Image: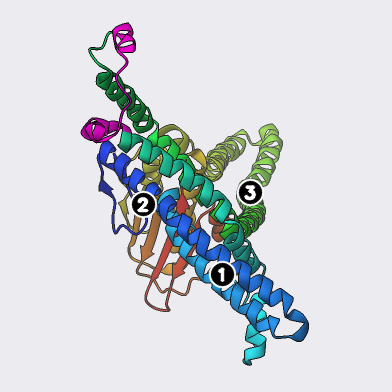
Amino acid sequence: METTYAGAPATYPIAPARRFLRQLGVDTQYVLLGFPLGLLTIVLCMTGFALGLGTMIIWIGVPILAGSLAMSRGFAHLERLRINPVLRRRVPHPRYRTTKATSWIGKMFAPIADGQSWLDLVHGIFRFIPSTIAFCFTFTWWVGALAGLTYPLYDWALPHVPDNQELPELLGFPDTAAVRIVFNLAIGLFFAITLFPVVRGSALLEAQFARGLLSGVGELRRQVAEANAARDVAQEQKAAAVSAEATALRKLERDIHDGPQQRLVRLAMDLGRAEQQFAHDPEAARATVAEALTQTRETLDELRALSRGIAPPILVDRGLQAALTALAGRCTVPVDLDAPVVERLDPAVESAAYFVVAEALTNVAKHSHATEVQVSVQRNATGLLITVADDGVGGASLAKGHGLAGLDDRVKAAGGVLAVESPDGAGTRLTAALPL
């Protein structure tokens, strides 16, 4: 089993027994040291607060109160460092109110207007309560365990009443010394067995009290900020998905209008002409029908190509590597494909990766004037990294109005990021990262 402690440079293995004893030592020193610190902070913080509040009417209490808040902030910072190994995680440091004032008066009023500074002062005044409770339990259990387990070593030095022979005979022991030793050993064994959970619970009681006052508000603010950031990202992904869908529909409509629709119009005209020719020129009618059959096959080929752009069957049936191989084979520019076979990914990720490569190769074939393009698809611990690089004229951009804008929206809709490096005359390198 591996465990990482705060401040450790790397993860290293610790045996369960050693980890158990280490945590017991950490919790014990935390509680035993917390008791005198609690005494010190309650005296200093309470004195400073009472003195500052009492002399506030003559204004001398303002600097005293500000100094008390600054002092409590120092004790709070020390406590945050102490509770890290107890909670087995790093407690975040909250943000304190800052001021732009340059005068000493403005700087003096900054801690008084800061809510976290007052929470630090509250902790300094009331931390003695959980510290005392934790200290009493921890000290009692350690003394009970050590005194009970080592009782046979000092029983001879303790004064005892004259032996009562009836009790030993009743219990089956030869004399009362054995009764005392066994009884105290049993007590020591009880305290030793229950030592870790009691000390651990005492340390957590004191540490969680400190965490709630010293970092709870800061953690809550951070969680709210993260939730807001996640909401913004979700809204951006939603907008990108809507934009990508609209772009794909417009492209599909344009492709159908420019391709199959025109061919179907011509097919209808050819069939109408053949119908008129059958009456007076059957040979011309047959030639027209043959040409119509050719138009039908070409229309079917275009419809199949469009269907591959919507949902390529090879991607669904055989996976991303096979689909990219077929895509590279159809490209008019030679493609050097590096896409190792991996296990099947989420369909949304595979679809997004396929369309990134498909759109990139389409742009390379239409605009880059490249002689070669390299495609790499690699999976790492966090996601899928797709790179498409060509040796063309460059000048590609993700700005609206360019060919890659819709691709950028599609990648964002999948939760990924897209980057393009395309200096003029130096080729284009497109990189997309998709989360798994």
Q: Position of residue 17 (x, y in %)?
A: 27, 37
Give the residues drawn in magenta, as a range. 148-171
Residue hosting label 1: 44
Q: CA distance from mark 1 to mark 3?
A: 81 Å
Assess disc 2: are there few (<14), some (14-19) or many (≥20) residues with their C-alpha within 10 Å of its C-alpha.
many
Pointer 3 local density, CA inside 10 Å: few below 14, some 14–19, many at least 20: some
The first of marks 3 and 2 along the sequence is 3
* Label 1: element kind: helix
Q: Nearer the viewer, residue 289 or 47?
A: 47
Can residue 352 be seen here? The reply is yes
Q: Nearer the viewer, residue 206 or 335?
A: 206
Q: Secondary structure at mark 2?
A: strand
Reading the image, the residue beneath label 3 is 256
Q: CA distance from mark 3 to mark 2?
A: 31 Å
Residue that label 2 marks? 377
What residue do we see at 42% from left, 56% from top? 33
